[in-house]
Amino acid sequence: MSHGEPSRKGRTPTLPTERLRLVAPEGRHFEAFAAMHADLEMMKYIGDGRPLDRPSAWLHLAMLIGHWDLRGYGVWAVEEMGTGELIGRAGLLHPDGWPDAELNWMIKPSRAGRGLATEAARAVLRFAWTELGLSRLISLVRPGNAASIRVAEKLGGSLAETIEFMGGPMHVVRYEKKT
């Protein structure tokens, strides 16, 4: 393998939607990725609710990229169709020890209220059911995150339980593949 091309290049499919392109996360996304993850409003309901500094954003992006090699699926960078601007991320995470893959999404607050999170997450959900053959997924949603709760409901998710996770309560939303 050469040092110029990552081994996974070409293995992450691009998922186009009406207004978005879900693409492989790459180093070219880092500046916009770091800016999004440093934004207090954007990170309010993500993980432990704290923004990431540049070194932590770098490690997080590297984890997302590596997840594709470890699982064969992962999180896409969400770009706006036409402009190519990175406006979020959406995909599937399945860390070691988790019972199911997590369907997740995150869209810049400046793009909120336009249905973009639902559009991106719906494309990921369709990929999970049709291409990966998964039959069950979860989403982890903080109780105060009304926008993500609405997205989960639009996608057919139902509240399964509320658990303690990363320092606070977290709703576990389940999705079951319709047969």
Image (spheres, rainbow, N blue to C red):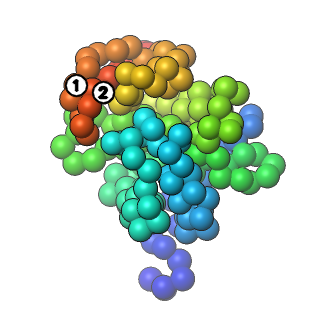
92 w.r.t. 8: above or below = above
Q: Is residue 25 among the parts visible in the rendering?
A: no
In which quadrant of the rendered image does the N terminus lie? Answer: bottom left
**SS at mark 1?**
strand
**Hey, what amino acid is under mark 2?**
Met
- In this view, the residue farthest toward the right is 82
Kindly identify which numbered label has been placed on residue 30: none
111 w.r.t. 38: above or below = above
**Hey, what amino acid is under mark 1?**
Ile
Kindly identify which numbered label has been placed on residue 170: 2
- In this view, the residue farthest toward the bottom is 2
**SS at mark 2?**
strand
Q: Are marks 2 and 1 in contact (CB under 8 Å)?
A: yes
Q: Nearer the viewer, residue 77 or 55?
A: 55
- Categorize mark 1 by other alpha carbons within 10 Å: few (<14), some (14-19), many (20+): few
User: Residue 149 vs residue 115: left or right?
Assistant: left
- Image coordinates of residue 33 in percent, x first then y, are 55, 57
- In this view, the residue farthest toward the front is 40
Residue named by callout 1 = 163
- Image coordinates of residue 50 in percent, x first then y, are 39, 47
Tell me what residue is drawn at x 74 percent, y 34 percent: 18
Q: Nearer the viewer, residue 68 or 29?
A: 29
User: Residue 53 vs residue 119: left or right?
Assistant: left
- Categorize mark 2 by other alpha carbons within 10 Å: few (<14), some (14-19), many (20+): many
- Image coordinates of residue 29 in percent, x first then y, are 59, 62
In which quadrant of the rendered image does the C terminus lie? Answer: top left
Tell me what residue is drawn at x 49 percent, y 31 percent: 125
